[in-house]
Image: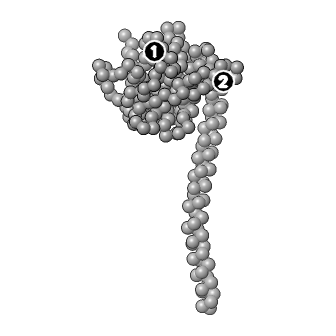
Amino acid sequence: MTPRWKFWLIGGLVTAVLAAAIYFPILRRRVKRAARLQQQSEEQARRELTQPIVVNPGDPRVKTKLFWASDTIDSTLVPVTVELPLSNDPVLRSKQVLNTLLAGPVDAELRTLPPDALLLAFYLLPDGTAIADFSEALATSIPSGIVSEQLAMNSITRTLEANVPQVRRLKILIHGQEVETLAGHLDLTGTFVVNTGSPQSPAADKTPAPAPGPLTPEKAPGKLAQPERKP
């Protein structure tokens, strides 16, 4: 091989290495983006198949208060008001607000519930006790820890409290079964108090929800979702 051919060969190899160094990171980002979009598409398809929710365009649009995580104070909820067409039927209305809560806020980092969690069923007993049956992802995909588990439960109970006054207490099931804890810490064997008195109007509460945690009963604010033990 002549020196000239060696020069061209080495030059070609260097060019190929440089091109690969530039192109591979771009390709990797495109692959990750495509995988993320595919996952989002699959999640949306799964939601459409399992949640044929009851949105009647004829329902009046109502200012609905949803509780998501604060972007300024850690482990705290803040109300976000959006307009939704809501049914007057408390069961359908509960499904509508909870599915909107599950869909999450615009900023995904502020969501309180796992993105793959689904509301499978919702029932309301005559005494005001609601039963919400969630998919297993609510327990398996949520970060384990009392703070994240309490924050998730508070977002559910406070959203129901603000929008469905007929719900007095809430029982959580996972895939149709009673479980002892949400993800290892928060007790799910009892019911959670939602409404204890006259419900507030959506515009009345402008203060952030209290930070969750292992508070003592004497210090626990009234808004916290505390399990109500059966006698």
Q: Name the residue that disc number 1 marks.
A: 195
Q: Residue at horizontal 63%, vertical 29%?
A: 50
Per the model, the C-alpha gap separating discs 2 and 1 is 25 Å
- Coordinates of residue 195 in the picture (x, y in percent): 45, 15
Other residues around mark 1 within 10 Å, as few (<14) / some (14–19) / many (≥20): many
Tally of numbered tags = 2
What residue lies at 67% left-to-right and 19% top-to-bottom? Answer: 59
On screen, residue 155 versus residue 39, left or right, reads: left
**Mark 2 or mark 1: whose residue is earlier in sequence:** 2
Give the x, y percent position of residue 174.
50, 26
Q: x and y percent of residue 161 in the render?
A: 49, 19
Front residue (pair 61, 135): 61
Left or right: 229, with 203 as reference point? left
The image quarter in which residue 190 lies: top left
What SS does tag 2 mark? loop
Find out whether the residues at labels 2 and 1 contact each other: C-beta distance under 8 Å. no
From the image, tell me which residue sits under label 2.
55
**As displayed, is residue 146 above or below residue 204?**
below
- Nearest the viewer among 40 and 176 is 40
Q: Is residue 35 above or below residue 219?
A: below
* Type of amino acid at the residue the image marks with label 2: Val
Image vertical order of residue 73 relative to residue 128, above or below: below
Identify the residue shown where x is 42% and y is 28%: 208
| Residue under the image location 53 percent in, 25 percent down | 65
In percent of width and height, residue 214 lies at 32, 28
Residue closer to the observer: 212 or 46:
212
Q: Is residue 191 visible?
A: no
Secondary structure under the numbered disc 1 in the rendered image: loop
Task: Name the disc covering residue 207, or none.
Answer: none
